[in-house]
Amino acid sequence: MHAITVRGRNAGIAAGLLAVATLTAATACSTSDRPAHAEGPATAAASASVSARPAESLRPLLQQALPDVTGKTFTSAVVELPPNASAAPHRHGQAFVYAYVLEGAVRSKLDDKPVTTYHQGENWVEQPGTDHVLTENVSQTQPAKLLVVFVSNTGDKLKVDDPTP
């Protein structure tokens, strides 16, 4: 009988979550019940008022409590960034976030790390508490789209804009 380590179990959970998220996006599944704590077009409108640039929109695809992980919820969503769009600086609370570029290119800056541009097929992760200082579509003419997976505390908001100075 094999002993399963915590690291091995967590890697298995992460791989399973990624597979579910990828399948969810590929089949364009959507949930008819919008998650109560998910942010959508209303948040995009609020972000747009901060800047003259278009804002992103977040469309939840699937939300489910994680079995055997009390108090944690899995959420997959598509984030769409119109041409020249940017998101207000924000955080995802204590969520672990995985982002995959479905189309286009996105410029991103996390905490004090360098600005990085991610193209279609590339991905990144955000650790709990990370400040997402910059998120923008690099194109003036083409949209960008991300598949984003959150593992969050059940009931937490998925995105909270940083206070404006």
Image (cartoon, rainbow, N blue to C red):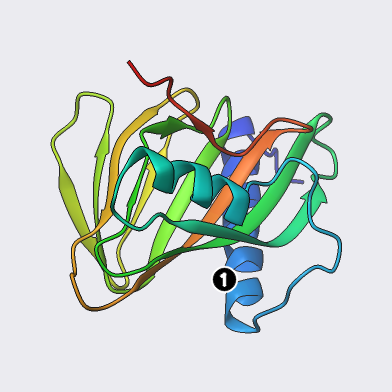
**72 vs 82, nearest the viewer:** 82
Q: In this view, does 105 lie to the left or right of 31?
A: left
Q: Name the residue under label 1.
A: 22
Q: Where is residue 6 in the image (x, y as percent from the top left)?
A: 63, 31
**33 vs 123, nearest the viewer:** 33
Please name the residue shown 74% across and 40% down the image: 37
Q: Where is residue 51 in the image (x, y as percent from the top left)?
A: 31, 43
**127 vs 80, nearest the viewer:** 80
Image quadrant occupied by the C terminus? top left
Q: Vertically, is 111 above or below 103?
A: above
Q: Vertically, is 144 above or below 5?
A: below
Q: Is residue 76 left or right of residue 124?
A: right
Looking at the rendered structure, the secondary structure element under dot 1 is: helix
- The three-letter code of the residue at mark 1 reads Thr
Residue at the farthest top position: 165
Please name the residue shown 44% across and 43% down the image: 47
Q: Vertically, is 161 above or below 144?
A: above
Would residue 40 be visible to someone looking at this image?
Answer: no
Please name the residue shown 84% across and 30% down the image: 70
